[in-house]
Image: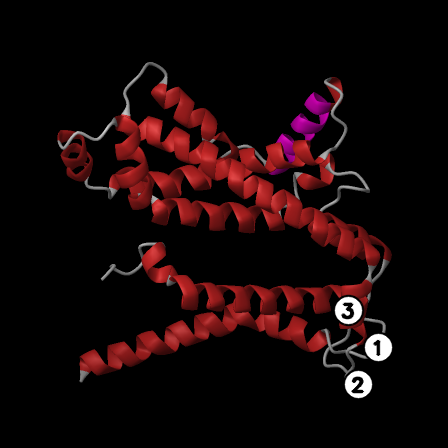
Amino acid sequence: MMTKLASFAGRVVVVLLLGFILLPALVVAVVSFNQASLISFPPQELSLRWFVRALTYRDFQKGFYNSLIVMCATAVVSVVVGGTFAYVIDRYTFAGKKLLEAVLSSSLVIPYFTIGIGFLIFTSQIGLHRTYAVIVLTHVVLVLPFVLRSVYVSLRGLDQRLELAAAGLGASPWQVLVTITLPLMTPGLFAGVLFSAILSFNEFTASIFITAQGTQTLPVAMYNYVREYADPSMAALSVIFFVLTTVLLVLMNMSLGLGKVLAIVERE
């Protein structure tokens, strides 16, 4: 009887916590359908005008396009660089190993706005004025610790006897890496891609210093919009984000099985 009560109480607590977390999102969703030009809750009349506004506003469209470019480039570069460094740090012993790992993870303790200002000053000195390359480089620095950790965890769970067996059968180091190591690193690499893509697309604190009018990402465009307008367009855009993210994750889970790819559940 006590076990059943404890189980029921645990489920109630989980439901209450989820409700507490989702309540702000529910309020934003309701506000997004407001007919009035000012944010009010509950809305007096319902309308889709702010969804149309969010989808047709030119700065949002340009910002979304810029964010996609930066996100894709950041994901590719950060996974290649982070995966390489994670493999080297995990498999080799060399002087300065701890220092290298600390430098690569330094963005976890340095405020993002400090990194943004630093890249702004540095790139201005060398003649790179808020280009896509500067934004991608900054985002790679910011997301690299998360990619390193996800790949490192995947490497620690890899059975190195499989690599030794392949080498013992005559496979070259390159063949072992391509046919054994990289496939077994897939969960960590895929998790690194997800982490870097999500963090890059939503990054604002550093991006505001390194983006120009033509290269501003969507979070920066949203910030600039809020400074001038106080209508429910932001609420409508937030709902669009939530729906698209949910649909994307559901489709990826149906096609790839995210639980197995991310090593949340055991592979069959």
What residue is pinned by disc 2?
A: 45
The image quadrant where one finds the C terminus is bottom left
48 left or right of 99 in image = right
Q: Secondary structure at mark 1?
A: loop
Which image quadrant is residue 49 in? bottom right
Does 51 appear in magenta?
Answer: no
Q: Which residues are magenta?
A: 112-123
- Residue with the most extreme front position: 170
At a point 25% along the width and 77% down the height, the residue shown is 6
Q: Secondary structure at mark 3?
A: loop
Task: Name which residue type carries label 3.
Answer: Pro
What residue is pinned by disc 3?
A: 232
Does 119 appear in magenta?
Answer: yes
Query: In x, y percent, where is residue 147?
Result: 44, 40
Mark 3: give few (<14), some (14-19) or many (20+) Cα within 10 Å.
Answer: many
Label 3 to label 2: alpha-carbon separation: 13 Å
CB atoms at circles 1 and 2 under 8 Å apart?
A: yes
